[in-house]
Image (cartoon, rainbow, N blue to C red):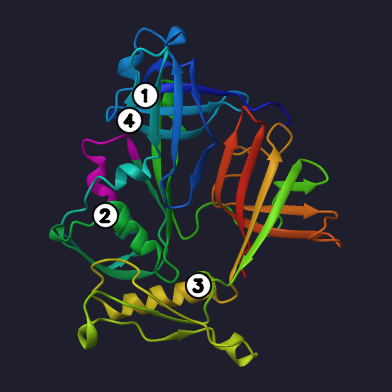
Amino acid sequence: MIAPVTLAWYGVDMRTGGIVEDLPSLTPTGALGRKLGAATTLQFDMVLAGAPAGWEAATAPGRSLLVAVDTAADTPVWAGGVLPREGGSATSVQLGAATLEAYLDARYPGTQTLLATDQATVMAALAGPALTNGPPLVIDSVATGTTMDYLSYDGDDKTILACLSEVMGLDGGPEFTVDVAWSTGHTGFVFPLRIRTAIGTQAPSPEAVFDAPGCVSDYSLAESYESGKGATRVIARGEGEGASRLSSAPVEATALIAGGWPVWEYRYTPATGVTNPDQLTSHATSTVGLMAQGAQVWTVRGVASQSPRVGTDWALGDNVRVAVERSPRHPAGADVVARCWAWELDPAGDTVSPTLVQET
């Protein structure tokens, strides 16, 4: 699809997902974006002269959501709960919103005992309380085939988001994200909480291609073995001090070390309240798999009107192809498939920028 990206903004009731008002004078002051398993925020300016009569109810902090729809594709691409709003003698009001992962950081799973339970079912159970007196979240999960034990204690004060992130951080742990979709009849929106072994489609030859020359205006490949980004030996620590502190077994990238790589050590605490050494070892195994050869992240800036369409041609978690004919960094060209872990869209600047992780 080659067309300018034009967004229609709606003020939506957070409890029902119903549209309260169209907001034609609402303008984001930066690029909207999303990240896998994490919240993103966005700031707005709304000119009052062009606002509808019910703008206050449509943008009430804590009660409303702002939803963006790509008008050419009729596809919702972003939704965020209104948190701050400020205005006075000025001709406009300023608003801030955060995607619904932030709402999960304001709800708690309570005390739950989940034994020998599929990982996706564990995530769904932990998120369950947010479905009561919250936004119209819809659990959309697919069993992973891997079971686990998970104990949640209300006294630990761990939010739903913290618990989901903890499970996602396990070796082979499922991923999650909160999407936005039209409700039946296009009268409002629902918010699927998707839980998958891997979010998106990891096609070996994806149809979405960012090419240079072509739709790509510029790109960069960031490679790093700095602290926290590269390691060939990882230990995950629990809480406590000294000899009483829980610890995983050391997990090494044995093939790399045997092949001549030096040992780079990394020790960290993956989450609060982890009391199972096996879970700590699982976290360490996942981390060394990600860090063994360091971070390799492609940041691509494409012309939005000429690029594959986010939400239609590709989405969060999907594999995307980057095809570079020639550049100073890649004089012989480059043709790689990398996975989208985040994206930003700036319709006013006609730019779209996926952040792509080249997984080894």
Mark 2 is surrounded, within 10 Å at the Cα level, by few (under 14), some (14 to 19) or many (20 or more) other residues, namely many
Name the amino acid type tagged 3. Answer: Ser
Which structural element holds mark 1?
A: strand
Name the amino acid type tagged 4. Answer: Pro
The residue identified by callout 4 is 84
Name the amino acid type tagged 2. Answer: Leu
| Mark toward the start of the polypeptide (2 vs 3) | 2
Q: Which of the two marks, 1 or 3, is nearer to us in this view?
A: 3
Is there CB contact under 8 Å for labels 4 and 3? no
Mark 3 is surrounded, within 10 Å at the Cα level, by few (under 14), some (14 to 19) or many (20 or more) other residues, namely few
Alpha-carbon span between mark 1 and mark 3: 43 Å
The residue identified by callout 1 is 12
Q: Image check: 108 left or right of 350?
A: left
Alpha-carbon span between mark 4 and mark 2: 28 Å
Q: Foreground: 189 or 69?
A: 69
Q: Which of the two marks, 4 or 2, is nearer to us in this view?
A: 4
Q: Which of the two marks, 1 or 2, is nearer to us in this view?
A: 1
Q: Which quarter of the image is occupied by the C terminus?
A: bottom right
**Is 222 located above or below residue 247 in the figure?**
above
Tell me where residue 335 appears, x and y as whole percent: 77, 59
The residue identified by callout 3 is 227
Name the amino acid type tagged 1. Answer: Val
Alpha-carbon span between mark 1 and mark 4: 16 Å
| Mark toward the start of the polypeptide (1 vs 3) | 1
| Image: magenta residue range | 125-137
